[in-house]
Structures are given as C-alpha cells and as structure tokens.
Amino acid sequence: MVAFKVTTVKSTPFDDQKPGTSGLRKKVKVFKQPHYLHNFVQATFSALSAEKVKGATLVVSGDGRYFSEEAIQIIIKMSAANGVRRVWVGQNGLLSTPAVSAVIRERTGHDGSKATGSFILTASHNPGGPTEDFGIKYNMENGGPAPESVTDKIFENTKTIQEYLIAEDIPDVDISTVAVTSFSGPEGQFDVDVFDSATDYLKLMKSIFDFQSIKQLLANPKFSFCYDALHGVGGAYATRIFVEELGAKESSLLNCVPKEDFGGGHPDPNLTYAKELVARMGLSKTSSPGEPPEFGAASDGDADRNMILGKRFFVTPSDSVAIIAANAVQAIPYFSGGLKGVARSMPTSAALDVVANHLNLKFFEVPTGWKFFGNLMDAGLCSVCGEESFGTGSDHIREKDGIWAVLAWLSIIAYKNKDNSGDKLVTVEDIVVDHWAKFGRHYYTRYDYENVDAGAAKELMAHLVKLQSSLDEVNNIVKGIRSDVSKVVNADEFEYKDPVDGSISKHQGIRYLFEDGSRLVFRLSGTGSEGATIRLYIEQYEKDASKTGRDSQDALAPLVEVALKFSKMQEFTGRNAPTVIT
Ligand code: G1P
Ligand code: ZN
C-alpha cells in the first residue's frame, strides 16, 4: 500500500469563484491557473460539516469533458489529505449528473459504505475542449445540488483562503479500470474505488419502468427510435440501456461515443444544436432522406437535460412535463400509487398547472434551478417536476434526468398503444395534440441573447424593474406597440419562500402577467461563463381546441413584438436578433 503524507500548500484567493445556478463554470484556461481548482475544492471541504469530510465517502466524476481527468486526480489527492476515507470514481471518470445522484442515494460499496456527497465535473450543455468550458459542483447526501446556504459558505471561503491540503505522494490512479486501490495516510486507509458507470443507474431505471413493455414497443414494426447523446456522457448509458436491455438497433444511436470536446459541438439538446437528430427527425430544411423515425430524443453533455421529438414534431419541455404528469400513474409503475405533487420552475409554461388542477394535485412554482425541487421531494411533496430548459425528472433522484425522460416517454407511447391492434401507431404528435384538446395549449418560446455586455444586460433589467412601478404606463406602452394583446394586470420580480425550510429567494426573474394568462418573463442566466445571457420567456394560453394547431412563432408574434419593443432589447444590447430561439 503506498503511504502518503499531507502537504499544506500556501495559496491566495481568487475573486471569481462564486458558484452559479449549477456550480462554478469557467473557461478551461481559468481552471488551469495554478491553485484555482485546488482553492475551490478546499473551500468546499471547509464549508462542509466535519463528518461529511473526515472518514466520508465521496463520488468524483463527470461528463468526461476536457480537463476532467486532471481534475479528478487533483480531487483524489485533496480528498485523501483532508481525511476522506474513500473516493468512488465512475470508470473513465464518467458518470452522468443523474447517475451521480443515483449512486449517492443507492450504491453500497463492497465494504458496506455509502456516499455522503459528490464533486460533479461538468459544465452541462456548454461546449468542452481546451478553449471551452469546465465546471465543478458539489452535491449533498440527498443526491441533490448543494443548497445556497452551502454554496454561499463555499464562496465566502474562496475569498479568504490561505492554504489547502494535498497528498502529493499519491500517484495518479488508473481510472480506466474497475478496481479498488488503497493508500495509507496519517489518518488511516484511503481507497479509490473505480466502478462501472452504468450498473447502479440501470438498476434504478429497471425499478421505475416496465422494461418489458418498452421492449415490446421497440420491437413493434410500426415504431422506430433514435437517440442522440451529442457525444456527451449519455452515450455511456445508451448502448447498455437502449440496445442491450431494450433491444433498440445500434443504428438508432447517434453520437453515443463520449468525447472530451463533444466532437466540437455544443452538447445542448435543442432544435438549434442537436442538428443531426433534428435533420433525421425531418425537422430541418436539410432533413435526411427517407421516412423519419417515430420517436427521437437527445440529452446534453452530462445527460440531465433532454429533448423529445416525434416524427417532424417538436415537444416543448413545458408540454413534456405536463404530459408525463398526466399519464404517469397509468404508464409508469413507479407512480402507480399516485403522484405526491408536481412542480415547475417559474419561467416554465403553465401547462403543468392545468394538469395539476385537473388531477387535484399539490402544485409548486419554484425559481429556476433544480435545487429548489429537492426540498419539496425530500419532504414528500413532489413526484414529477420540470423546467422549460429541457429539464424533466422525478423524486427517484435529486437531479433532472435525460434518460429517465426518454424512458418516461417510451412508457407513455407503449401505454397508449397497448390495445392498439390497428395498422397506425398512436404517435408522439397524437399524444400531444390529444393533450392540448383536453387541457388547452400553452404556446411558448424562449429567446436567448448570449454573451451580451454585462453592464448593458443589467441596465435592461433595471429598466424593466423601473417600468413595473406603474401598470398604467406599462399598458400605455403595450397598447402603443400592439392593440391586439391583452392587458398587463400584474408585474413583479419573482420571489420564492421555500415551503419546507422557509428560506426566501429574491430577484428570481422579472414578470409581466397579462389578463388572458399570457406571460413575459425576463431573467439573467446564472450558468454562463462569459458576459451575460438575457433570457426572454414568452407564453400564451389557448383553451379553444380549434385554435391549438397554429405555428407557435406565428401565434406568439404579437407578444414577441411587445416584449422586444418595451424592453428596448435592441437599444440596450445592440442585438437585432437572439442567439437562440427555442
Ligand atoms: C439554465 C436553465 C435552468 C437550469 C440550469 C441548469 O440556467 O435556464 O432552467 O436549471 O441552466 O441546467 P440559467 O442559465 O438560465 O441560469
Ligand atoms: Zn446538463
């Protein structure tokens, strides 16, 4: 057993280590500065209570992006020096964010140990590579992201840090082979346990879904399937789950080899970046020849996000969570006892609200970011939740879950086709259109202005807050722009009081609420790594079933015009078009 001693290394603070919506995200070159990662890791250890460090078991893995391997080796050495007992690493350093959450909650080590936390190395859907992004976040014992009380402490620590601890004698551990390697330090034994990335997650999925009925669906000649991992970590699960377990053809998997630069692409499952899938599904101008598959899905770099598509048909994430909630009890064994409640983030459309109302379910509207769902789930108040930003999930873990969402949709399609002996499949589009007919449709779009000058973005937000002081003035401006939109009846900044712990989160987005249920929401992104990103969310409710079949950009055009003009978007940002429209 290699012995190690603990070295104390002097350091000085960096002033830019404030964790955002999902941890600390920066360009790789920032993370590569001497001591930069070390400071953040030490600041995290110092923010945790002693028993979560000394003698503890931690998971360290991520989406495999560039710099991950180096970071894992550093965290292993720092964990040993800080008295951690074991570090669990997914083979090749790969674990999807939802799989990390599952491993914390479900895995028992060969010596009976359980993990109490995790460093997840990912910048999610941001590109990877030497000139792109890296990220690190800490998840807690419940498998969910650290709450603000902890991330605030981490940030405070980064501002005063003077030194960190590291076990420099520990050689780099081979993380490509499943094995346990032990070392001996001043406080006793330290183990690095490299384990198979998919086993625990697969076991959990099998306990939630009826794999047999999904298998039958995939074998149905009327059905066809396609999944695109965008070269993210989802690829590490796709072959095991979709091909080996469920019998999908190898050829139904796209970009399923994880790459440290995501093949040069932007691993974000939306209509702009999932180009190959979008073409295959018949949704782009350069669509692939031949008949598109009946079902297509993609996930992001760390496989917590998902996009669901039907043949030539896009399912908005806001509709997706509403449809999953509406069908969960019948279609997914895990929910057969009923849903405890449902929740969505504030900017997500109100499609879920209508389902909750109809099924008489507890309903919660929380700020953007998955951590707010965790408290509700831990308190047994919420089973299914989602965000408009391609995040969907349930209380099986404390993160959103891309592959879970795919399996949920496959379960719903299987359920809808259970007694269908006709020659026509009940398609994704049929399921969505039926849902609209029953519940009405929430036309929805999001405009993102990426990498805008940070000062200009702040000024725009200040302008929008100032306008809120007089609804009369707002309505005069709105009417002056378009006379065919409804009246603004409420305008505020979203504030949330957590019903479980009473904590209050302020300034969670600027809202303009209209009399007919339409909404405009403006937010600054908390996950960007450069400049500012302004997000504008636009929504309009249509109850009349005969009007739910319009093109959503057409239906929303008047509201979009109002939003852009009264926010003075072009004046403040200099942009005459958004970077991405979803
Ligand atoms: C974005 C999404 C948000 C999601 C987060 C992490 O955050 O909008 O819904 O939880 O990524 O995936 P934002 O950049 O808007 O702060
Ligand atoms: Zn992600």
Image (tube, rainbow, N blue to C red):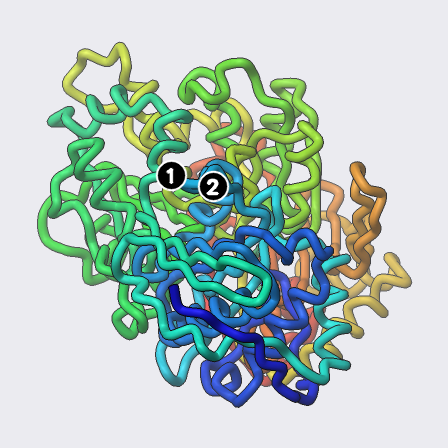
* Residue denoted by label 1: 200
* Nearer-the-camera pick, 88 or 470: 88
* Location of the N terminus (image quadrant): bottom left
* Nearer-the-camera pick, 382 or 386: 382
Determine the secondary structure under disc 2.
helix
Q: Is residue 154 left or right of residue 32?
A: right
Taking 156 as reference, is 549 above or below it?
Answer: above
Tell me how far mark 1 sits from mark 2, CA to CA: 7 Å
Q: Give residue 440's quadrant in the image.
A: top right
Instruction: Identify the residue at horizontal 57%, vertical 70% (top origin).
Output: 81
As shown in the figure, which amino acid type bears the numbered disc 1?
Answer: Asp
Q: Residues within 10 Å of mark 1 (few under 14, many from 20)?
A: some
Q: What x and y, as percent, mark residue 400?
A: 50, 45
Q: What x and y, as percent, mark residue 546?
A: 47, 30
Callout 1 touching callout 2 (CB < 8 Å) = yes
Taking 247 as reference, is 213 above or below it?
Answer: above
Q: What x and y, as percent, mark residue 231?
A: 28, 61
Q: What x and y, as percent, mark residue 28?
A: 45, 81
Q: Residues within 10 Å of mark 2 (few under 14, many from 20)?
A: many
Instruction: Identify the residue at horizontal 40%, vertical 59% (top origin).
Output: 182
Determine the secondary structure under disc 1.
helix
As shown in the figure, which amino acid type bears the numbered disc 2?
Answer: Ala
Instruction: Identify the residue at horizontal 39%, vertical 53% (top origin).
Output: 193
Q: Is residue 42 left or right of residue 438?
A: right
Instruction: Identify the residue at horizontal 82%, vertical 67% (top origin).
Output: 465
* Residue denoted by label 2: 102
